[in-house]
């Protein structure tokens, strides 16, 4: 399956923050993300991560019924995880949006060996966003016998 578009995933300063602390947080730049519905794959552009079987550049597979811009805006609600000293384990214990928490912490605190990009797969008349996501996850799982590193599980 071929992505409809690919964009770089970039963290930028939270210039709309009202306090000094919120301005120090980073957010995902969603300025040119579409409101299309569909599935998405967050991945390194070239770097591969070892898996149970083989390796892959895919970090996370997800979907949105509400548009890509809104989905990634929701990730930005956990921007405090980008601050130095953010406690990932404590936050995962306390918060309900575990995927969002984990992704934002990962983006800000892991030394990345490569650019991170997002492949966007738009829904057509054939598939819903969930069906597209399932097909991508199934393909990944059949290749590696596990989910991508930033996927917590199947919904």
Image: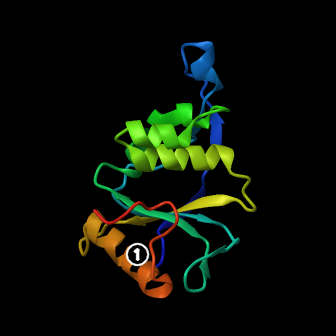
Q: Is any atom of residue 75 visible in this view?
A: no
Q: Is any atom of residue 146 visible in this view?
A: yes
In terms of depth relative to the viewer, which is nearer, 29 or 138?
Answer: 138
Q: Quadrant of the N terminus?
A: bottom left
Colour pattern = rainbow
Tell me the residue that label 1 is attached to: 136
**On the picture, is 62 further left or further right than 148?**
left
Q: Quadrant of the C terminus?
A: bottom left
Is the residue 52 above or below the residue 107 in the image? Answer: below
Is the residue 79 above or below the residue 97 in the image? Answer: above
Q: Position of residue 135 (x, y in %)?
A: 34, 77
- Number of numbered labels in the structure image: 1
Q: Position of residue 2 (x, y in %)?
A: 48, 77
Name the residue at the top extreme: 19
What's the residue at 37%, 80% (across, down)? 138
**On the picture, is 41 further left or further right than 43?**
left
Q: Position of residue 98 (x, y in %)?
A: 41, 46
What's the residue at 47%, 68% (across, down)? 4
**On the picture, is 113 further left or further right than 83?**
right
Q: Position of residue 90 (x, y in %)?
A: 49, 38
Is the residue 112 above or below the residue 72 in the image? Answer: below
Q: Secondary structure at mark 1?
A: helix
Image quadrant of residue 47? bottom right
């Amino acid at each position: 399956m071929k992505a409809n578009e690919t964009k770089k995933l970039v963290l930028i300063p939270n210039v709309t923050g009202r306090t000094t602390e919120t301005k120090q947080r980073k957010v995902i730049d969603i300025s040119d993300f579409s409101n299309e519905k569909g599935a998405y794959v967050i991945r390194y552009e070239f770097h591969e991560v070892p898996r149970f079987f083989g390796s892959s550049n895919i970090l996370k597979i997800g979907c949105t019924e509400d548009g890509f811009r809104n989905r990634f805006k929701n990730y930005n609600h956990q921007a405090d995880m980008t601050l130095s000293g953010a406690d990932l384990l404590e936050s995962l214990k306390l918060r309900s949006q575990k995927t969002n928490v984990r992704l934002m912490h990962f983006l800000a605190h892991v030394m990345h060996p490569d650019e991170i990009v997002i492949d966007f797969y738009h829904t057509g008349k054939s598939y819903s966003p969930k069906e597209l996501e399932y097909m991508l996850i199934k393909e990944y799982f059949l290749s590696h016998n596990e989910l991508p590193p930033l996927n917590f599980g199947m919904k």
